[in-house]
Image: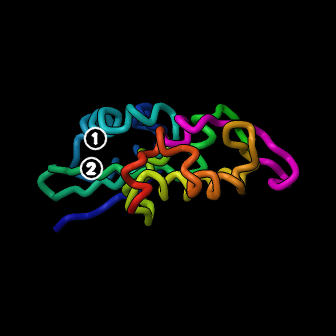
Amino acid sequence: MADTIEVLVPGGQADPGPPLGPELGPTPVDVQAVVQEINDQTEAFDGTEVPVTVEYEEDGSFSIEVGVPPTAALIKDEAGFETGAGVPNEEFVADISIEQLKTIAEQKKPDLLSYDARNAAKEVAGTCASMGVTIEGEDARTFKQRVEDGEYDDVLGAEEAAA
């Protein structure tokens, strides 16, 4: 019978200590092998908290499923700040480029409701607005209209503009 453990670990930096070790200790799996596999699969998220699910069998075999970090965590990592604005509509803590926004949208796309890069970027921009992060030096709340006007078709894909 398979059992499951769900934890948040820093990408590429999991270790046998908490929160992973205490959860895996009583199981039949090789803790070091699990830690190594998690680090291999999460190294692209370098230090960002990543949701990980470990499914294991009584014979010690295991499989790992790596989720995508929360959008806010990806924005903080990309923009290099610790905490969002206290009053997001009035205070701004960071600015990101359209290329950075596109990178975040691509990383997060499997978890978003969007079907294309343009709409994924608009979803990420919504999180930017609530955190007090500007895009290309302007309020993230105006980003949606600029995307719809085709201002970023060269970056987000003009072919998707017709969709």
Quadrant containing the N terminus is bottom left
Q: State which mark lies toward you, 1 or 2.
A: 2
Image position of 136 (left or right of 46)? right
8 and 109: which is toward the camera: 109
Name which residue lies at 21% across and 51% down: 63
Residue 21 is situated, as x and y percent measured from the top left of the image, at 40, 44
Name the one closer to the observer, 116 or 32. Answer: 116
Residue to which mark 1 is pinned: 34
Q: Say which of 2 and 105 sits in front.
A: 105
- Vertically, is 93 above or below 129? above
15 left or right of 101? left
Dot 1 or dot 2: first in sequence order is: 1
Name which residue lies at 78% across and 40% down.
Answer: 93
Within the magenta stretch, is there residue 87?
A: yes
Q: Quadrant of residue 75?
A: top right
CB under 8 Å between discs 1 and 2: yes
Query: Picture coordinates of residue 151 (x, y %)?
Result: 58, 45
54, above or below 32, in the image: below
Q: Secondary structure at mark 2?
A: strand
157 or 96, which lies in front?
Answer: 157
* Residue 87: image location, x then y, percent: 85, 54
Q: Which residues are magenta?
A: 85-103
What amino acid does circle 1 point to? Val
Provide the residue designation for mark 2: 64
Q: Position of residue 155 (x, y in %)?
A: 48, 39
Residue 55 drawn in magenta = no
Which residue sits at x=34%, y=47%? Answer: 25
Q: Tell me the SS state at disc 1.
A: helix
